[in-house]
Image (cartoon, helix red, strand yellow):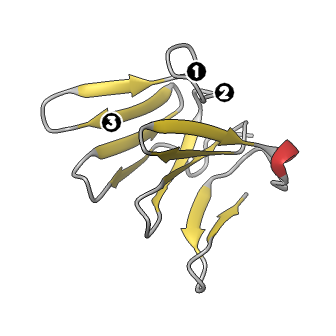
Amino acid sequence: MGVRGCRRLAQTRDGYLWAATLDGLVRFDGLRLVVFDKATTPGLTTNRFCALFEAADGTLWIGTEDRGVVRYRAGTFESFGPEAGLPDAWVWNVRARDDGAVMEFT
């Protein structure tokens, strides 16, 4: 495995700054840091985050080092791994295809 491509930052259109780390997902609102991890956040199955991408509809997609991809939408996290059809559990890049659909790369 390794950490190639991990530890990324993204600012979402709602103004939050997000950090993907290998020990949780961090959200900063300008005053407070909030850490989301598998011990405290329903829907997360890992603490090892590698990629961040905000889709056109405002959904935040988060790639993980060991569990696939996580979708954050309307305040809820939902995880998708190889059992959901992903080719690999390591998602280090997420981007939009030309047709607007989300595509993840491992």
The extreme left residue here reads: 31
Quadrant showing the N terminus: top right
State if disc 2 and disc 1 touch (CB < 8 Å). yes
Instruction: Give how far across and how far down residue 88 sits, in percent.
Output: 82, 50
- Residue 45's mark? 2
Q: Earlier in the sequence, mark 2 or mark 3?
A: 3
Residue in the foreground of this view, choosing between 18 and 7: 18
Dots 2 and 3: beta carbons under 8 Å?
Answer: no
Query: The residue under label 3 is which amino acid type?
Result: Arg
**Label 3 residue SS:** strand
Residue that mark 3 sits on:
27
Image disc number at residue 38: 1
Q: Are marks 3 and 1 in contact (CB under 8 Å)?
A: no
The residue tagged with tag 2: helix, strand or loop? Answer: loop
Q: Position of residue 66 (x, y in %)?
A: 72, 36
* Residue at the far bottom in the pictured view: 98
Say few, some or many: other residues with alpha carbon within 10 Å of mark 2 (under 14 / 14 to 19 / 20 or more).
Answer: many
In the image, residue 79 lies at what x, y percent? Answer: 66, 39
Most distant residue in the front direction: 74
Q: Earlier in the sequence, mark 1 or mark 2?
A: 1
Q: Crowding at label 1, few (<14), some or many (≥20) Cα neighbours within 10 Å? A: some
At horizontal 60% and vertical 85% (from top left) the residue drawn is 99
Q: Classify mark 3: residues with Cα within 10 Å, few (<14), some (14-19) or many (20+).
A: some
Report how far apart the C-alphas of labels 1 and 2 lie in the structure.
5 Å
- Height in image: 37 above or below 57? above
Q: Which quadrant of the structure image shows residue 43? A: top right
69 shown above or below 37: below
Q: Quadrant of the C terminus?
A: bottom right
Image coordinates for residue 55, horizontal then vertical, percent = 47, 65
Q: Amino acid at mark 2?
A: Thr
- Write the residue at 28% across / 46% down: 17
SS type, badge 1:
loop
